[in-house]
Amino acid sequence: MSTTAPPAAEPGATSHEVAVRLRGIGKRFPGVIANDDINIDVRRGTIHAIVGENGAGKSTLMKILYGVQPPDSGTIEINGDQVTLHSPADAIKSGVGMVFQHFMLADNLTVLENVVLGAEKLHGIGAKARAEVMRISDAYGLGVDPDRLVEELGVGARQRVEILKVLYRGAKIVILDEPTAVLVPHEVDELFGNLRELKAEGFCVIFISHKLDEVLSVADEITVIRRGTTVKTVEPQGVTARQLAELMVGSELPSPSTEASTVTDEVLLRVQHLSLPSDEGRPLLDDISFEIHRGEILGIAGVEGNGQAELVEAIMGMRAGATGLVELGGQDLSHRSTRERREDGIGYIPEDRHRHGLLLDSPLWENRILGHQFREPSVRHGLIDKGAAREDTQRIITEYDVRTPGPDVLARALSGGNQQKLIVGREMSSDPIMLIASHPTRGVDVGAQAAIWTHIKTARRKGLAVLLISADLDELIGLSDRIEVILRGRIVGAFDPSDVTPEQLGSAMTGAGEDK
Amino acid sequence: MNRARLTKIGLGIASPLLALAAAFAITSLVLLAAGDPVWDVWSQLLSWPKTRNWANIIDNSMVLYLSGLAVAVGFRMNLFNIGVDGQYRVAAFTAAVVAGEAWLPGYLNTLLAIVAAIVVGAFWAGIAGVLRATRGVSEVISTIMLNFIATFLVAYLLREWAVREKGSNILGTREIPEGSRIPNIGLGDGVSQIYGFIVLVVLAGFLFWFVLNKTRFGFDLRATGQSTTAAVASGVSVKKMIIVAMLISGGVAGLVGLPILFGDAYTYGSTFQSGLGFAGIAIALLGRNNPVGIAFGAVLFAYLNEQSNPLQILVGVSPQIVAITQGVIVLTVVISYELVRRYGVRLEQWEVARALEADRNDRNDRNDKASEVPA
């Protein structure tokens, strides 16, 4: 699949426009080549997207450009001058600013205080600083209120404060690391509006993402990174998201869409009036009822922190204090322990694989046993059967394409995608009748994502009831037979994925669609 | 895989050696600073012990080993049982009273006393376990407090149950009758003997290994120790695990004083050996909570204790110097294990990356060939 886009900037031809020029950047970590011969030109007054799988080396590259890590080889030119960046302070001096994926704001300070913090020398901390903050905010349509406490702000507003911080420090080159990962669709549109304003003012924005539709809509140039090296720089007009994705993984890939419906009449999971009180005020779960049929995938959409995690944990019996009925195959689970629920046939792919899914410092074969301590082949008559466990781990490694030298490797040594494939393989072992998949493809690369989608579809075809929780709306729409939206611990709407757009879901998730 | 295994074993041996070397160096510096004869001290400490010294070392090792095991059970679960000291005191006292009263004949009496010691030790630790599980009280605090309570409780009860030995001021429980004592084992020189309790000590070590590594219960316990959250998600009841782990730890702690009781002292008195519980913490750390490692640690500590005895007479240096060595070992052990662990993890990540790199290159070669054909 080749693209029709013209090749990127011929070196030398347009050098006066180039704000950032990276040449031959390389960075090695023990055993891993993070970056290798990276060449990128970013022009002034453009939004330049850098896309690639997780682990392709995007973050390392940006850390090099922001002075967090020194490169092993290669040169960085900013506005035509070769620079050596020893620290973020050097980078800021050169006009490079970065907005990290995880915000670095003090909740108990105001917006103004957060912006000024650490940059007191520029405009003091008084009226001059305030005037400068307001000037920047107005100039680029950021619309921040300098006296609000950060803790009162939503995610989108916090991000704008982070951008303001960077601009306040005089950055002309702004790096945004996965800025849309935490935003709902209409916030993304606002962000893009802000970015376009910056661009019009002659700033240069480097935008890191793996959400290709967004990249295509906002970027002027797109550089694809695969296995630590620049594969190609393209213009968005000439490519489709699919072609970009294929450049990223270096091969063709499947889509999440489901095949013909396998939904049956038989109800497998019935949840009725499930509630979970919290210590302060509003319950975490409020009277939730739904059913999942054999062979059906029910998707739960919602902004993070609206009760998805609690819902899953309540169904798994991990939350004391949950009230209401949970019935699996006609059997009341309400008073059963987590282990009994697992024995009854629930497979569980947890949201946070490091906290809930793995023993990171144990070998893979011990991780195969985790959550299945009560059943063969790994355990027989209360005794661990190491041989059988290793053998079955080897089976999962083969069937689920877990890239590892063998079952004796520590779980920590695997990449996120391979850890996740191991978990999926483990939870699909010993014939579960229901699968709970909580953010199953979060933080995994495109290749593993496709594999996990296939496994979830296989589970559905085998007649499992699947509960799918995801923040990736395309994934939800593509895989689910039915989507319910959760907001503040309540189910607020149901959608048919065949005729719903991410925007409609997004507004339901934020409560904008509550009147319908 | 074989090479990886060898590397693993090599790393496992490297860390304690590193720690010992560092500890010896630091001790030497202390000696130098104090103006003591460094060479003489080491030549005494590292001289080959006589058979009767070996007997003492082995006896002392048994006690330290049990103490180390007791602490290690907790460590495996991420519980810090500082209370082994109190647990073994109440337990040894109870065993002494039961055996001394001789309600049952012969070895039945011994058995009953041992069971009583285990139950009482478990109970004493179980208090901390229940407090932790139901009220979230840190077991570190509660076991320290229980140590004090144990000391005074035993002192108080000793008054109630004690008999005074003829011609001495020492209070003690009634002596264990001859038929209920555990016979000692001769070392062949006709004089030196070690406690017959060694059989039970070895059995305890084996059971520790078996339960932790081979049973589902042990798996649950280790899983909980590594990651509470993952254990919960796998269906382990953490509260139950905390209580059971503390009970087992306390039960093993209950055995600590028994080799001395049944092989040497035959009575629990105000002079009964104390402080064994704290040594156990150091030994468990040194032995990485592994039954064989703990055995090495226990022998090393017992060896240093025994070899330091004549220092004052022969070299004119206080035997307390080995307490410094032992203390420093604990610190260096923690550091060197962490260093070696990180190195090991890096090594493994590197190996995985290398194995996958080769794999990936194959794959990409194929893909590149495929994509050369225009779509």
Image (cartoon, coloured by chain):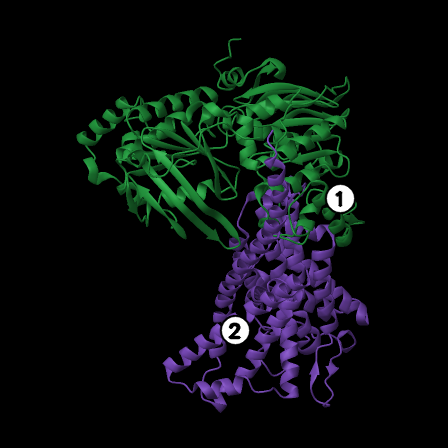
Chain colours: A green, B purple
- Classify residue A12 by image quadrant: top left
Residue A516 seen in the current view: yes
Residue A429 position, x and y percent, is: 74, 39
Q: Name the amino acid, label 2.
A: Leu
What is the chain identity of the residue bearing mark 1? A
**Does any portion of residue B225 appear in the rendered image?**
no
Cβ–Cβ under 8 Å for marks 2 and 1: no
For label 2, the SS is helix
Q: Are marks 2 and 1 on the same chain?
A: no
Percent of width and height locating residue B71: 60, 61
Q: Quadrant of residue A436?
A: top right
The residue lying at 63 percent from left, 74 percent from top is B61
Of all chains, the one bearing label 2 is B
- Left-right relation of A223 to B177: left
Type of the residue with mark 1: Phe
> How many residues crowd mark 1 within 10 Å: few (<14), some (14–19), many (20+)?
many
| Residue in the foreground of this view, choosing between B266 and A42 | A42
Question: Which residue is rendered at x = 40% and y = 35% of the image?
Answer: A103
Left/right placement of residue A92 relative to residue B315 reads left
Rendering coords of residue A21 (x, y %) = 35, 40
Task: Give the numbered dot on residue A51.
Answer: none
What residue is shown with label 2? Answer: B20
Mark identifier at residue A374:
1
Give the distance between the C-alpha atoms of the residues marked 2 and 1, in whole angstroms.
42 Å
Q: Is residue B102 above or below residue A437?
A: below
In the rendered view, would you say B126 is above or below A205?
Answer: below
The C terminus of chain B: image quadrant:
top right
